[in-house]
Amino acid sequence: MKKLLGILSVVFVVVLLVGCGGSDDSDTKRIAFITDPVGTNPFLTQATEKLEEIYNAGTYDMEYSIMESQDSGAWLDNVRAAVEEDYDLIIAIGWQAWDPMNEIADQYPDAAEYVCIDTDCANDNIKSITFNAAEGAYLIGAMAALVVDELGFPEGPIGAVHANPGQGSFPWRFGLMEGAHYINSDLEMDDFIFNYTSSYSDAALAKELALGQYAQGARFINGASAVADFGTFEAALEKGFYTSGQDADRTNPDNPYILSTQVKYTGVVTENIVDEFFSETGIITGHTELGLADDVVGAIYITDDGTNPRNSAILTDEMIVILRELAEKIRSGELVVTVPLEEDYIFGE
Amino acid sequence: MFLRMENIYKKYGSLYANKDVGLTLKKGEILALVGENGAGKTTIMKVLYGLVKPDSGDIFINDKKVDITNPRAAIKHGIGMVQQHFMLFDEFTVMENIVYGREPRGKLFFDVKKAKQDVINLGKKYELPLDPDRGLNGMPVGLKQRVEILKVLYQDTDIIIFDEPTAVLTPQEVTELLKTMKSLAAIGKSIILITHKLNEVMEVADRALVMREGEKVGDVLVKDTSIKELSYLMVGRHIPNRKVPKVKVGQTVFETKNLSIVKKDVAILDDVSINVKRGEIVGIAGVSGNGQSELVEAVFGLKKSTSGNVIINGVDVTNTTIHNVRDNGVALVPEDRNIHGSAAMATLTENSIMGYYHLDGFSKYGVIDYKASEEFTKELINEFDVASSSTKQLMNSLSGGNVQKLILAREINHKSPFLIVAEPTRGVDIGAMEFIHKELIQKRTNGDGVLLISSELTEILDLSDRIYVIFEGQIKGEFTRENATKEEIGFLMLGGNSIE
Amino acid sequence: MNKYYKKTLNLLEPLKQPAMAIGFAFIVGAIVMLFTGANPIEVYGIMFKGAFSSQFYLSATFAKATPIILTGLGASVAWRANCFAIGGEGQMIFGALTAALIAIYLPGPLWIRIIISMIGGVAVGGGMSLFSAYLFDKLQMSLSISTLMMNYSSKFLAMGLVVMFFLDTTSTGGMLKQTKQIPEGMRFPRVNADYALTIGFFIAVIIVLLVWFLLNKTKYGYESKMTGYNPEFSRFGGINAKRIMYLSLFISGVLSAFAGVSEVYGTYFRYVSGSLVSGGTAWIGLNAALISAYNPIGVLISSIILASIQTGGTAISRFTDVPLEISQILQGCITLFISAKIIIKWRRKKKLIKVVEEGGN
């Protein structure tokens, strides 16, 4: 017992000594990328993979650190520590960034450049980039209306398993409904079924909700609950209804029922931010919302060709032509997708 | 010589628990190990059983030196111990308890059939029959002890240590046990019996080894000695025959009128009317479990009585709170000192101030004056000669007799006109017993009343001015010191009806 | 010399078990890391650095320890008196929500709002705890179960209240379920503007001393301790066990709720749904209480150690490529090894109580 304690304390001291190594000073720029745990969430992996790619390419004299924050306490710790540890560019992704980034950017406006992705931090010291998710959802909605029509259920219902209710995620619902209505003006608000997982990872719940919607007659069920979409996909494979995912290309050669994905190209955004940081202007603060026209929002097979072959038996070439025309209309500004407040929203107007 | 222990030394701090102790044991011999609490009996047995490592000394079995560092090694060398507090699982059956740890195996799994047969055979062999499938829950203590003995025998032991085996038994069970020991010895098992009870030593043992203050002070053949000589060796002084001084009897200080507790149509206490006057020790004789505990609980309001009254000093306190009863002048030395009388993990001070801590001088504005409390504890320790090293030591570091002394000290110090003592000398050595009896008589001489509840008939007869006999919740008879006879009380205690 | 050595050993005795638990956890963690190709010595070095190596990190650790200390004290007070309540989380949530709402919506001068908001917060926590005491007293509902259930319902009830009535729609467009921020003048001042540490930690230390006094010097402390050691003896000695239970659970609820209040005043400046749950603060606090055998000073020390494992854990993800999961495995191992010891202890205690109860019949 005593021996063991002795050994442990020796180990501890060694660890101490090793831990206190020196650090080197150079012109290498340091980038902190602060995020929820990355795991297999494609919304986040696109960005982290892009950072690795930029680093490996060696274009810029930079190094980076992915700071995964498991809870809101860790978010506060990491953002504060990033400043303390002299990072030059601090990128935070997700809504959790709001409080810590605002606080730190107010306290240390000049210590680093601050960028928030996917949340509008409304702060003069921060560059905020948000996505016009409704544009992607609009394309998926149009696709859904085309597919159910093809399947012989033109009146729907069209299902959707999303993460959260409330205004924050209204763009996804709004886009889906309006896009479907664009194709089939006979659709009514009652022809859509929305359910919520209240989580980004509860695949079991998502599956249950999707099965319920299928039982109610839904033959296209839109998944928009991040990792939990796996549940919706599994239900689709079992029951044979069609579905679509979110964030990054979720199509799968083993599951032909996943027709497409509404995408946020966080990799593109990350690359843009790094480029801007190393450009002459540096990071330009303020809020920008990016959409189809900026190539950061879209849908697989419509705004890009995807990595897997398209299920062209269902998502036919004719449909793709129609949908690409629609995308072009949005891109050119001919069709404007602006999300209203949920309580002011009147379907189909 | 079968077992030999030589020059065993064991020192705790500055105190020798064992000092140059030697011990021998022949095959088929019953050796009684006697001595006051703290004399070092337990230590030497723990050394033998591998629970304590001696500072020096050797153990030989069949003249071969052995190294016993843990109980497993002891069992391997054929040494088994029947513990005072049984090491049994109440949830298991008799068979499961006996074979636990040495289960017979079938091809793959525990062979239940064989295990049961083993237990039945074992019971037959040693004439200790037991139903292998019976659960231990609710089993009488005597039978549980039999399970414990069979468990030890199942381990193929040749030497069996019994640690105070009769402390928890009824008189009939004691007789049974002593018979068992003799028959075990007759078939060649060697037995070491740790005990306080010298009459048991005289009845069953071949030889007695007497210890005092860590040293061996006597090793005598039982046939050549007497209780008197043994007790002299044990305490180092002669125990005087008690003379109880005459005291004038005063007013009634405690009275129950037709007190009953009925639970599910069964009367646990049945119409009990007793009284205690100032200057009296009143004994309640009876085998444990005949309503004595319930009587105490009913008096203190811990169990609600269904009818009848409890009157203290003329005040009716029936079914009130324990605070109220105590405030009216009752102190209590409860039956089980470890469960109701003390907290093992608390310090001596914390144990001593229970019942006092809310009084002036012990606390002020809700804050306890620990300095005063420690002074108080020291006084108790000094007055009652409690062997201890510090007021901060934990209660469980004291021996049973000393725990009891401290509890008695605490309760007597209340200077209440009435004291209830239940089984005050259970499991306590002779010295402590003497002391406790002396204090009870002193209390009576001071003109207070004492209610003595005890299953030791000798104790009752020795001390009581009046005696009630209780059986199945009923008072079966009342005697005065003068007209009490052991035979008649014993008869009533065991359910006989009064001869009158 | 020898005497001092022995004295020090005696003082360190209570630290032996937790030290062993943490030691074993580190060894298991090291094995896991070796399998994933990380260098355990480097990772442990970073953990240590990220928790203690500078004032900045130390203050982060202390800030993290604050709610752990308070919930740990809350658990200590209850468990010591044999009340095995585990409602710290629910009490923390409603303490925090109540304090935040009063601070945000009550009109009047700031200092009055501070006082009312804090009293309101802890009163709600104490009340919740009293309710479970009542359920036990009148309906014999197990304390562990009623408090655990209240944890769950509190979590969702608080979330519902925030979303339905008190949602801050200005930040993140309502994506995060949180209330508005409390006014700046009400927040706990920081010890140093650059550090996370606020005066909340020092308030917690003062509370540690107060609880120490309460438990070791007062009549209540004596009564609750003796009840914990041996309820039957206490009953025979005239201690009113019910009073002790109600009182202990109330104090426990108040302390846990104050952990929530301190998080609102010193860390989040608002009630953020899920923020008090996701870090497992109340459970870590319970761990701290059990490791230190309900000794308030011990709770302070073990809370800081447990907090350092958390701050050190986040540092791993900042300084290395080791995935967050590894540091979570490590934290899990430590909790596991410590809890293993705790469960044994708890079962022993339960067994003792059972024996005592049976003996009493």
Image (cartoon, coloured by chain):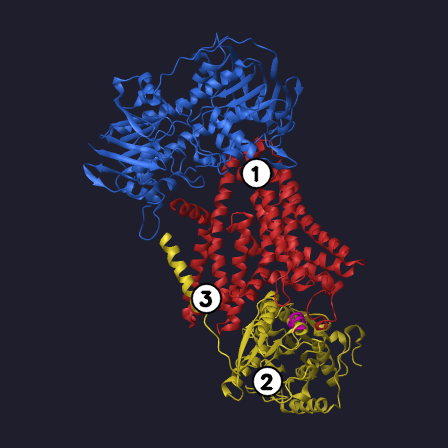
Chain colours: A yellow, B blue, C red
The chain letter for the residue carrying disc 3 is C
Q: In which quarter of the image is residue C258?
A: bottom right
Residue C76 lies left or right of residue B344; in this view the side is: right
Point out which mark residue C227 bears.
Answer: 1
Q: Which SS class for mark 3? A: helix
| Amino acid of disc 3 | Tyr
Residue at 56% x, 36% y: name it.
B370
The chain letter for the residue carrying disc 2 is A
Q: Within the magenta stretch, is there residue B498?
A: no
- In the depicted view, which residue is nearer to us: B127 or B61? B61
Residue B305 visible at all: no
Q: Residue reaching furthest front?
A: C1
* Marks 3/2 same chain: no
Quarter of the figure with the N terminus of chain B: top left
Of badges 1 and 3, the one in the foreground is 3
**Horizontal and vertical percent for residue B289?**
50, 26
Q: Which SS class for mark 1? A: helix
Query: Circles 3 and 2: CB distance less than 8 Å?
Result: no
Residue B98 lies left or right of residue A320; in this view the side is: left
Q: For the magenta stretch, what is the residue range?
A: A97-104
Q: Within the magenta stretch, is there residue A99?
A: yes
Numbered circles on residues, count: 3
Q: Residues within 10 Å of mark 2 (few under 14, many from 20)?
A: some
Residue A15 lies left or right of residue A96; in this view the side is: left
| Amino acid of disc 2 | Val
Point out which mark residue A274 bears.
Answer: 2
Q: Residues within 10 Å of mark 3 (few under 14, many from 20)?
A: many
Dominant secondary structure (helix, strand or loop) of the stretch shown in magenta: helix
In the rendered view, tell whether residue A184 sits above or below residue C128: below
In the rendered view, tell whether residue B241 sits above or below residue A31: above
Q: Which SS class for mark 2? A: helix
